[in-house]
Image (cartoon, coloured by chain):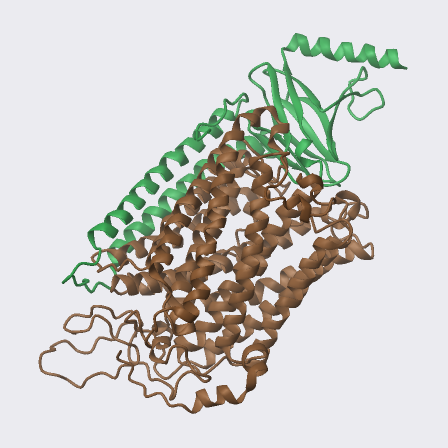
Chain colours: A brown, B green
Amino acid sequence: MSSAIPVGDSHSEDHHDLGFIRTYIFSTDHKMIAKQFLVTSLLFLALGGMLAAMIRWQLGFPGQPLPFNLGAILPDTMAPGGIILPEFYNSLVTMHATFMVFFALMPLMAGVFGNLLIPLQIGADDMAFPRINMLSFWITPVAGAIMLASFFVEGGAAGAGWTSYAPLSTSGEWTGVYLGQILWLVSLIVLGFSSITGALNYVTTVIAMRAPGMTWFRIPLATWSLFVTAWLLLLAIPILTGGLILLLLDQTIGTAFFRPEGSGEPLMWQHIFWFFGHPEVYILILPAMGFVSEVIANRSRKPVFGYHSMVVAIVAIAFLGWVVWGHHMFQSGMNPFLGMSFMATTVVIAVPSAIKTFNWIGTLWKGDIHFDTPLLHAVSFVALFVIGGLSGIFLASAPVDIYLHDTYFIVAHLHYVLVGGSLFGIFAGITFWYPKMFGRMMNETLGKLHWGVSFIAYNLAFFPMHNLGVQGMMRRIYDPNQYEFLQSLQSTNTFISKSVFVFVSVQVLFAINFFWSMRKGKKAGDNPWDSNGLEWACPSPPPHGNFAEIPIVHRGPYEYSYPGREQDFWPQNEAPVESFGASTKPEHKPGE
Amino acid sequence: MNLSWIMPESVSTFGPALDNLYYVILVITGIVFVVTEVVLVYFMIKYRHKEGRKATYIEGSSKAEWIWTSATAVIVMALAIYSKGIWDEIRHPDMFPENAYELNVTAKQYEWNAAYAGPDGQLGTSDDIMSRNQVHVPVDQPVIVNLQSEDVIHSFFLPQLRVKHDVVPGRVWPIWFEATQTGEFPLACAELCGLGHYRMGGTLIVHSKEDFDSWLSEMQIEAEDDE
C-alpha cells in the first residue's frame, strides 16, 4: 500500500509499557475506548433484540407460553407459566426502545465511530481530552447497570414507554411501577453525562486538532457527520436531562411540573421530550449517513457525488431537527394553528434527505462497484432509508397523521429509519473499519450470508407493519385480538413475528464472524480497501498515538479514479508529484 | 395475511377528503419509491466490477442537484398546502360546526364514559345521561365531543371516522365529526395508558335521528326509574 508515512515503533512500545489495566480497562486511547464501546453496545443491542423477540412472541402467538421453556427462567411477576403479563409487555416495549436508542444505537454511532474515526480521519494523535474520554465510556456501564437492575425490583422495569409521557410516568399509582420508573430516570440522567463529555471531546478535537492541510472541506463525510452529531448531543442532551430531573422530582418529592393535580402541564413534558427527541433521531441517523457515503464512494471507486452539498445537507438536517418537534404532537392537544408551521418545517427535511439519497445513487453511477459486505450494507441503507423517508411524508401531513398516528405505520416508519437506516449503516461501518480496528479482515462469506438473510428477513418483518397501520392497528397493544376489527390481522402479525425471529437469530452469524475474525481473519494491510482517508495511512491497528509523524493533507478524501493516474485512489496525505510530463492538468484541489 | 394499502371504509364527512390526501401521497411516494429503487438496482448491476472497468471521475453536477432539490421542495410544499386545507377543515376552531350535538367523553383507566344532556338540555348537570364504553351519536348531524381525562393521557380513536385525539388530564378538548352511516364502529385507546391499555375499547353507535332521540328518552326513563 502507498502509505507515505514511515511508522516508527516508539508508540507501540508505550502501548506495552502501560500494562494490562491501563491498556484494556482504564485506557485513554481513543481506539481502545471505541472498542470498549463497541463490545458493550453490541451486548446491549443483543439484549434489545431479545426484548423485541419477546414482544413479537406475544403479538405473534398471544397468550401462548414462551418457547424454549423461557417461562421457567422468568419470574411469575413477568411471565407466569411462560405467558407474558400485560404489565411485563409494557416494560418490554419500554425497555426495548430504551436499550436500543440509548444503550445500543447512540454509543454505536458516537461512542464507537466518534472515537475511532475522528482522530484518525483528521490526523490527530488522540482526542483533545483523553481522560474525559475514558470517563465518557465508564459512565455507560454504570448507567446500564442501573437500567438493568430495574428489571429485578418490585413492580418491574419502567412501563410508560420510552417517551415516558406524563402523568402516566409521574406516579406508580398509574402503572404499578414505582422504583423501576425512578431507576429509569436516574439511569438516563447518568448516561447523559457520557454523551455530553463525549460530544465535548469530539467537537473540540475536530475544531482544534486537524492535521496541516485538513481544511473543513477536506474532512471526510464520516467525521463531518460525527462532528455535527456531537453538536446535537451537546445541545439536546441537557434538555432531556433537565426534563428527566423535573420528572424525577414529580415522582419523588411531589412537585407538579407535569402533573395536572397541582396545575402542572402534561403537555410540557411532551414539548421537552420531543424538543430533545427529534434532534435525537438525527443523532441516530446522521453518523450512519456519513459511513455510507464513505463506503459507497470507496467501493464504487468514485468521488462522492456532490461532496459540498452532502456537507450542507448534513448541517441543514441538523438545523431543521430543532424546529420540527411539534409533528410528534399533532394529535396531542397542541394549538391546531401550529399544525401548519410544523408541517411546513417537517416536509422541508425531505429536501436535504433527497439531496443525500440522490447523491448516493449518483455516486454509484458510472462507478466500478465492488460487492464487498460493507457495500451491501451501505446500499441496503440507501434502499431502506428511502422507504423510511417516504413513509415519513404520510406522517408529516397532519390530517393523514390523525389516522396513522400511534398505529403500526409509525412503528414501521421508525424501524425503517433506525434499523433499515441506522443499523445497516452501523454494519457497513463495522465491516468497513473492522480491519483498521483489529488488523484482520472479516470473513466475506459469513458477512454476505449475514447481510443477505438479514436484509430479506428485515423487510419481511417490517414492511407489512405499514399495512397493519393502514388497517388501524394501534402500537403498544398487548393483545390486538381484544378488538374485533383487528382480529383479521393475526396471521399478518404471526408472519411478522416469525420474520423477526429469523432476523434476530441470524445476528449470531455476525457475532461469530466478529469474534472469529479477530483471531483467525486474514491479516489486513494498512489500507485493505485502497482508500484515501488518513485512517488508512497508519498501521492496522494503529499504535498508541496513531501516526509516527503528523500527516500533511494535500487533497480531499474522495479522489478515486482520478484521470491520468495509474492507481484508482489518491491518499489525502500522498505528496503531490512536481509537474510531471504527461499530466497537462494542474493539480486538482477540490474543495478549496 | 393482510397486505392491503387500502384504508378501511370511512364513515365521516371529512373522511373522504382525508383518504384522498392519503391516496395522493401513496401514489406520489409509490412512484418515487419504485423509480429510486429501480435506478439503484440498475446501477448496481450495470456498474458492477468487471475486469478492466474503470470508474468515471465525476464530482457531481450542480444542474442535476438543483433539479432534484427543487422538484422535491415543490412536491412536498404542495402536499403541505394541500394538507393544510384539510387540517383546517377538521381542526380549525372557526370551522367547528354551529348546529352540532354536544356530548362529553371522560376517559379513565380503562374505560370511556360518555355523558349526554338530560331533560334540562344542559351538559354537566346532575340529570346527564351516562353510557359506559358506548358513545351514541346521531347520523348526518355534526357532533362535538368534549374530551376529558380523570387520570393519565388516553387517545380517543375512531378509526372509521378518521378521528383521533389525545385526551389530556387537566383540560377539556373539543373535537367534532359527523357520521354518514348508521351502525356500530370501534372506539379504541391509541395512547399507552397503563397495563389495561390494550383492552380500553368501546363502541361508537351511530343512530338514525329518530332512533337517537328514542334511545335518549329510553335512557331518561331508565334514569328516572333508578331514582
Q: How far from the left and from the top, in percent, is residue B43?
A: 24, 51
- What residue do we see at 56% from left, 47% from top? A52
What's the residue at 56%, 86% (across, down)? A19
Quarter holding the C terminus of chain A is bottom left
Q: Is residue A92 visible?
A: yes
For the residue pair A40 and A549, the one nearer the viewer reads as A40
Q: Residue at x 21, y 58 (%)?
A: B49
Instruction: Return the x and y of residue A272 as percentages of the image width and height.
Output: 64, 54
Lateral position of residue B74 relative to residue A273, left or right: left
Q: Residue B66 falls in which quadrant of the image?
A: bottom left
Instruction: Report the front residue among A62 and A311.
Output: A62
Left or right: residue B96 compared with residue B214: left
Among the 4 quarters of the image, the one containing residue B168: top right
Q: What is the x, y in percent for residue A573?
A: 30, 81
Q: Is residue B112 above or below residue A54?
A: above
Residue drawn at the location 57% of the way across and 59% of the way down: A44
